Image (cartoon, rainbow, N blue to C red):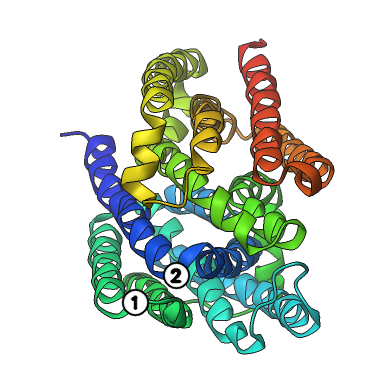
Amino acid sequence: MSSVAINAAWLLLAQIGGLLIPLIELPILARALGQQGYGEIMYALGIAMTAAVFVEFGFSFSAARRVVGANGDRAALGQLVADVLCAKLMLSAAVGVVIAAIMLFGTGATALPSHWFIWIAMFTVAFGFSPIWYYFGTEKLMLPAMLDFGLRGTGLLLVILTVSTPQHTERVLLIQASIGVLNTLVPTLAMLRQTGIGRFEVGGGWRVLRESWDLFLYKGAQAVMGSVASTMLGGLGGARAVGTFVPAEKLVRAATGLAGPLLNAAFPHLVRMQSTSQSEAKKSVGIWLIALALATVAFAATTTVLAPWVVHLAFGPGYTDAVPLLRMLVWIVPMRVCSMAVGILWFIPTGREQLASRVMIMNIGVICLLALWLVPTLGAIGMAAAFFCAEAMSCVALAYFFAKK
């Protein structure tokens, strides 16, 4: 079996932990906490995930590409580890100040207890300091995949056993933040055992930050799209709007994320293929795009028909407002998956991430502008319309630049 297939299988296992387990958890929390409590949880997680984007800084691609180039040189890998950790420490200090200011001086229409700063900070560290970039580059994903699946499963069990009323809202944050920290700490220690660690130098940290800037814009924009809805809705429309929108958006994100293992596993292979024959690489990416488009359009059409049943099964009574949202949002899946594929498999391996990052930044800008205009009057439907328009523009732009010679 090829290394791409093996790593895709391990990443799929991790994706089950990262997306499908939260889908199992979703109806439990939605029923136990209600729209208000569930909305507060999603708003807090939105702040943490947005902050983690700035700490992670696109290293999952830029540093992974450096790992591939190191060819197993332990000294080079150790220095890369030191430079990346140094950069993340500098970034986390700045991000921590911003989070503290948000918690102390108010968060718009949704007020969170100030001591939740602890859990939000833990989430930020857990996601921002993940060493998955090293395992992508070495194509040895068994440890992080198995650990992720096991810990997330443990977290789900703890939620089932201990969360039953809105008074248990903070308990959810405690469980998930603790699981996240363990999920980062263990593979980090395993990485350090294999690579050692070089000298911590501010210059090295700045160097990897400069190298990662364009990939940060690209990867960061993708990650922000996963949290911007809950953050903006919480600030503009209140926790109930978040509680209405996020369940449908979470189903769509899970469907989109299932393409991630295949694309991330193929990434090192495409990096090598680009160096030998760009025409063959482009042909391969074209085949990927056609296959993914056909599969995701079929999924979107099926979900549109079954939306009332899906919402009732997943969320229970009281979430009927999510049906029209799901029917609109599910058509984002084909556009987003194709955009991800052309970015990860073509623009980044060919060193053209600057173009892809500009398109993604445009996406975020369109979402924010349309949300500011539409959410105050249309609520969650306005946010869904903003996402749909932005994704359509991005998909068309990336397809154009991919097809252009």
In the picture, the disc for residue 391 is none
Which residue is situated farthest in the bottom direction here? 115
Image quarter in which the C terminus is found: top right
Image: 121 above or below 278: below
Q: On the image, which quarter does residue 354 sit in?
A: top right
In the picture, the disc for residue 33 is 2
Task: Name the residue rendered at 71%, 81% in the picture.
Answer: 103
CB under 8 Å between discs 2 and 1: yes
Label 2: how many residues lie within 10 Å, few (<14), some (14-19) or many (20+)?
many
Lower position in the chain sequence, tag 2 or tag 1: 2
Q: Is residue 213 left or right of residue 254?
A: right
Residue 1 visible? The answer is yes
Q: Is residue 331 left or right of residue 183?
A: right
Mark 1 is on which residue type? Val
Image quarter in which the N terminus is found: top left
Q: On the image, which quarter does residue 95 sit in?
A: bottom right
How many marks overall?
2
Image: 316 above or below 382: below
Q: Is residue 61 left or right of residue 114?
A: left
Alpha carbon of mark 2 to alpha carbon of mark 1: how far? 8 Å
Label 1: how many residues lie within 10 Å, few (<14), some (14-19) or many (20+)?
some
Task: Name the residue rendered at 45%, 54% in the picture.
Answer: 67
Q: Position of residue 15 (x, y in %)?
A: 33, 49
Mark 2 is on which residue type? Leu
Residue 73 visible? The answer is no
Q: Position of residue 49 (x, y in %)?
A: 58, 63
Q: Nearer the viewer, residue 356 or 174?
A: 174
Image: 86 above or below 267: below
The residue wearing badge 1 is: 163
Which residue is situated farthest in the front direction here? 317
Q: On the image, which quarter does residue 135 sit in?
A: bottom left
